[in-house]
Amino acid sequence: MIGLNRNTVNRYLTKIRQRLAEYCNAQSPYSGEIEVDESFFGARRVKGKRGRGAGGKTIVFGIFQRNGHVYTEIVPDCSKATLQAVIRGKAELKSIIYSDGWRGYNGLVDVGYGKHFRVENGKDEFAKGRNHINGIEGFWGHAKTRLVRFRGMSPNTFNLHLKECEFRFNHRGQDLCRLVLSILRNQPLN
């Protein structure tokens, strides 16, 4: 219809996703009430370990500012040092942090965050008033539903697709076409 080869279209889509990823990464710091969580992306479980430590999964860490935006980052592991480094880089110290009971979040108060509240999912506790992580969990559902439509993708482009999901989530209800065009005016594809 438009006279372009499929490979050319895919190359342009990749460049647009790169600009969206740069735009999303520049958004910070987050403050106020913040939810943090990690999620595992990848193929369905074949056989073997479920959940944490399942083979072939990509670990993604997310920060969600309540009534605001989400930030995602692919991380090598869910260790305390890794997760706290991302939190310190993206969240202001005056923020109120909500997380699940994972030990990687231990010590947030010790590094300067005044308030840290936990939800113990392992004890069937998912919400106690304002103490919940339903916002970031909602984003995980949004991202996984959107990404499953691709029926697999290259590990090289997974981050770009994830950042596109982040961009779409953060700007839901806005005219995405105008926003993408303004981003591309500031940073042309070349």
Image: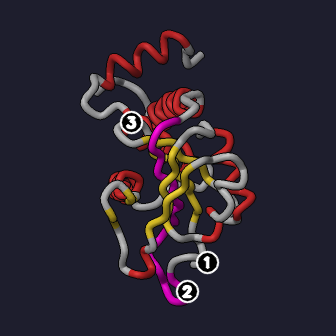
As drawn, the residue found furthest toward the left would be: 173
Residue 35 in view in this figure: yes
Q: Nearer the viewer, mark 3 or mark 1?
A: 3
**Quadrant assignment for the N terminus:** top left
Q: Which residue is mark 2?
A: 49
In the image, is residue 33 part of the stretch drawn in magenta? yes
In percent of width and height, residue 115 lies at 55, 51
Q: Amino acid at mark 3?
A: Gly
Real-space Cα distance between discs 2 and 1? Answer: 7 Å
Which residue occupies the foreground of this view, 91 or 37?
91
The quadrant holding residue 180 is top left
Report crowding for label 3: few under 14, some 14 to 19, many 20 or more residues within 10 A (C-alpha): some
Residue underneath mark 1? 53
Q: CB of mark 2 within 8 Å of CB of mark 1?
A: yes
Q: Which circle marks residue 68 in the picture?
A: 3
Q: Earlier in the sequence, mark 2 or mark 3?
A: 2
